[in-house]
Amino acid sequence: MKKNLVLSLMVVLSLLVPVFAVSADGAETLVVGFDQNFPPYGYVGEDGEFTGYDLELAAEVAKRLELEVVYQPIDWDAKDMELDSGTIDLIWNGFTMQGREEKYTWTEPYKEAGQIVLVAVESGIKDFAGLEGKNVSVQADSAGLAALEDEANAELTASFGSLTVVPDYNQAFMDLEAGAVDAIVMDIDVAYFQIEGKEDKYMILEEFVQKEDYGVGFKLGNEELRDKVQEALDEMAEDGFIQDLSNEYFGYDSCTLTACVEAAKSK
Amino acid sequence: MTVFKITNAWKSFNDSVNVLRGISLSVESGEVVSIIGPSGSGKSTLLRCATLLERLNAGEIRYGEEIIAENDSAGKSVYREEAALRACRQQFGLVFQNFNLFPHFSVLKNIADAPINVQKRPKAEVESEASALLEKMGLSDKKDAYPFQLSGGQQQRVSIARALALKPDILFFDEPTSALDPELTGEILKVIRSLAEEKMTMVVVTHEIEFARIVSDRVIFMDGGVIIEEGTPDLISNPNNERTKTFLQKLRR
Amino acid sequence: MPLSVILAKLSQGMATSFAIFSLTLVLSLPLGLVVALIRLRPNRPIQAVTRGYISIMRGTPLMLQLLVVYFSPYYLFGIRLTPDYRFWAVIIAFVLNYAAYFAEIYRGGIESIPVGQHEAAEILGYTKSQAFTRIILPQVVKNILPSVTNEIITLIKDTSIAFAIAVTEMFTIAKAIASAEKTMVSYAIAGLFYYVFNFIVAITMERVEKRLNYYR
């Protein structure tokens, strides 16, 4: 009797997996995967809801495609599995194309960005030479880390006293504030956002560690959805939606889509 | 009337040396049998086989008219199915050397739980019987105590009451005073003696030979897995067998 | 972000954390007992299966098990995953993992009961299941309580692992608010929540232990 009970329990458990897995709602959704700790692209807004430059773009795209947008914060390390298994439709999250060109199907780059060095003003560091022997921090699995590990920056990286890899930028800032590190290598927009109102304490070095392009990433081969999203983006470029949103978020027109460039020319 | 009978019993553990070597023992109703012998003589194993805690390799066991185990054609013991064995367990009781009271039950519950839940007898009836047993054991005031609050002698008296509550036809004692301080053995022996006076059928494995001499109808000397001598309690004063003599001398010293 | 919004957001996360915690506990405690009982059976092949299960569950990180439970329906069977499944994958993985730990605790507890207790129960005529539920299990429960308390407290803290498959429990929300607001307030509140939660568990378990202290 007891054996039967156990056996049936195991059967039930193994049945649960597909039951839960296939209870698809079937609704037409656009599931946007993003790292919720990545302002200003995707983060928790004043009202406690997810917001951000990329998420607002995604919402507008979904609206134009007549899809319901679903913001799905993901564990950044699991992004490929999430995309492969179809639990998210795309990654839109200040997603750097360089080095990943062959791993995803991409839209055109819609924004330029780059990796810079952020330092505390009182550290006295003014340029890359000043970083020699200093403690530098960078986020794990980030474009900043990739840039530092790139051969082009080998000399710069070698000049650091130490390179600390932290799980997220927030921790890097806590370290910088506490004096545990002297500099953070990070995305320029994220840096501007983070130091807003604290310009007296932090500054960004003029030189770029690396310049990069942001695109919307799809599962490799998912051209169908990519094309739809690209079309919607072009439309949004033509009617100025992207430019307005960029001004709102970054204080300038950061759009690099061909359609944006054309629109600017025709003005 | 024969209450218990074990015939030509053989027992070895893990196919090594035989602990029981063709031993036979029959106990009549109202009889008190003491089993005496050096350690390793097989007397505890005999008791454990008799109470079905261990299974014989060969031999037969009967309780009353009922055959519990008998030899098959190959001469190996075959036991009846578990339900029949469980029913049979109601016919005998066993008092352990280490009492083995249930620590999470009160004294009263230790005694009353099995009659209520195993024999399915009415709670009120069982509990009043249990109280009477406790009074007989001189433990009326310990009804609500827990085993850890009792002395060894008191615990053993509770365990005797627990065995009696199931109204067994025969009661086995496995060295009931061995785990007790010497000054506490007397109270247990007194209880066994009063049970003997009530004609309770009992088999007592013991080292207390003086006690065995007074209380027993029959004394059995065991060694090497067999009975080497058996007879009236006078045997203790006048053993015939050399090994019995040596053993008794050792105990007297 | 006003404090009220932070609190509202965090309490959503708390509800998720608490749901993970309580469902895991309610399901893994009995499952662990079943596993322990199978593990203690003389049947060799079945014993080997439960031993293997326990060994894998204790020998690999919970986070990995979480990913396997969540993604394997897709990678092994090509089944499309739905958002609902995220939460249930967490529950399945947590229950399987904790049941293994509880099983070992039960096993130790059962094995620590003196053989004389089993023999006394047998002699008195209790059936095997009566002996287990009336005589053995109550003593096991008392013996294992401190170890179970430890596991429960670990479980509270483990709920934050759920974010590996994007279930936003409280700690993840606290992290998100902290990075958006550049403030430690949400961490402080989260820390306080975990502490109070653990404190309540500790007090409750202490009470239970005291209640079982009527015997030794």
Image (cartoon, coloured by chain):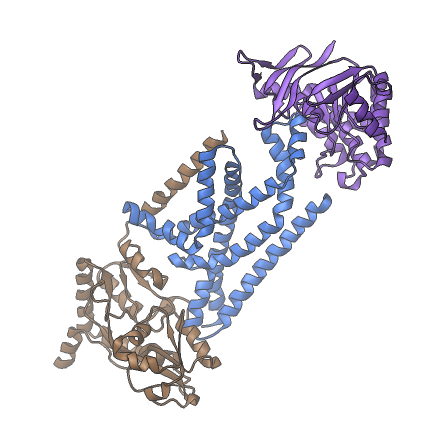
Q: Quadrant of the C terminus of chain C?
A: top right
Instruction: Please tell me whether residue A39 is drawn above or below residue B35 in the rendered image.
Output: below
Name which residue lies at 30% across and 74% down.
A149
- Rendered view: A243 above or below B154: below
Q: Residue at x 69, y 49 (%)?
A: C210
Is residue A24 in view? no
Residue B156 in sight from this viewpoint: yes
Picture layout, residue A184 above or below residue B13: below
Choose top left, top right, bottom left or bottom right for residue A208: bottom left
In the displayed orientation, state which residue is furthest to the front: B242
* Location of residue B235 (image quadrant): top right
Q: Position of residue B232 (x, y in %)?
A: 83, 15
* Colour of chain C in the image: blue
Q: Colour of chain B?
A: purple
Vertical placement of residue B158 versus A168, above or below: above
Task: Where is residue A49? Give x, y as percent.
Answer: 39, 66
> In the figure, the brown chain has which letter?
A
Q: Is residue A88 left or right of residue B249?
A: left
Q: Nearer the viewer, residue B178 or B184?
A: B178
Residue A256, position in %: x, y? 20, 76
Circle count: 0
Q: Residue A198 placed where, x, y %?
A: 42, 84
- Residue at image point 26% right, 61% down: A90
Residue C24 lies left or right of residue C144; in this view the side is: left
